[in-house]
Amino acid sequence: MFVEGHAISATYALGAVCTWGFSDFIGGYTARRFDSFLLASLTHLSGTILVATLALIAAGPFPPLAQIGWALAAGACGGLSLALFYHALAQGNMGLAAPVAALLSALLPASFGILTQGAPGLRPSAGLLLALLAIWLISRPEGGLRPRGLGLAVVAGFGFALFYIFMERAGRGAALWLAAASRFSSLIFTGAITLAAGRFSPVYRLGFVWGFLAGAIDVTGTVLFVRAAQTGPLARAVILSSLYPLITVLLARLFLGEHFTRSRAAGVIAALAAIPMLMAA
């Protein structure tokens, strides 16, 4: 049963990898010609509508207010971080911004999870280290120059780390309700900033469609991560979920022609090798 539970957790986390990686590519590409805070507000709006509707249809029990409070705190951190992250991705180097944010967002929650839940076994521990190495290899700067958007990616990474920790502290309540509360909080915070600062340009019509689509995909990843954290150790769920830059980098290479260095190729291989190790009990 223990082995099965960890395999289920890893499967949820891999689902988060695919959905988050794809939604970040869409969001980062759209933000090149669309205000990042307005775009984040749109993604949170569509995400809130989708997951709240699913929660109502499922008619599951509503979590206690203490759990909702942690989910709201997670949403505040994650929502603001996503807006900054979109802006970092829009600077023209998704292959760097995404892994840097993922690396920083993984280290703090993984360390927190190991301190509170204990270290995993030898093979999963090796997988954790290999996954961190993969993210670092993908994010290495070239030529000793500080790339554009790196500072924003760093700030976003710390915000995502708090999101991970707070969502885990929300406990084992209904994943859909917790995700809905988190996304609603994200909407309130980014929406308030957008309105207060008058961030309504630049925009373009198709960007609204992309924003709503990215939000629906992104919130799906949130639900999958919540289930991963509920069914397995936080450290493993965070590290495995943080491999989502693999998808973003591959899509940026395929559709935008971003340069794929040898270190990033090695990082992709290391990430793929880490996945079965992380799935082991």
Image (spheres, rainbow, N blue to C red):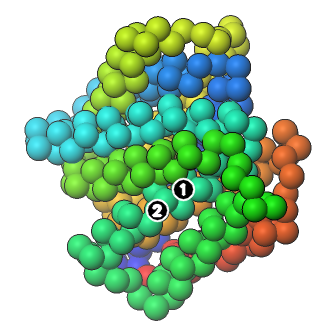
Q: Position of residue 10 (x, y in %)?
A: 48, 66
Labelled pair 2, 1 in contact (Cβ < 8 Å): yes
Residue 65 in which image quadrant = top left
Instruction: Give the spatial CA distance, label 2 vs label 1.
Output: 6 Å
Residue type pointed to by label 1: Ala
Q: Is residue 1 above or below residue 184?
A: below
Q: Is residue 136 above or below residue 2?
A: above
Label 2, residues with CA under 10 Å away: few <14, some 14-19, many ≥20: many
Q: Residue at x 56, y 25 (%)?
A: 36
Q: Residue at x 61, y 14 (%)?
A: 208
Q: Is residue 158 above or below residue 56?
A: below
Residue nearest the observer in this picture, 6 or 241:
241
| Left or right: 232 in relation to 266 | left
Q: Residue extending furthest left?
A: 65
| Left or right: 55 in relation to 14 | left
Q: Which mark is residue 102?
A: 1
Residue 90 in which image quadrant = top right
Q: Is residue 216 above or below residue 128?
A: above
Number of labels in the image equals 2
| Left or right: 62 in relation to 180 | left
Q: Position of residue 170 (x, y in %)?
A: 22, 50
Quarter of the figure that contains the N terminus? bottom left
Q: Position of residue 140 (x, y in %)?
A: 70, 64
In the picture of the structure, the residue carrying the numbered disc 2 is: 106
Residue type pointed to by label 2: Ala
Q: Position of residue 85 (x, y in %)?
A: 55, 39
Where disc 2 sits, the SS reads helix
Q: Is residue 63 visible?
A: no
Q: Is residue 126 visible?
A: yes
Residue nearest the observer in this picture, 144 or 3:
144
Q: Residue at x 78, y 69 (%)?
A: 263
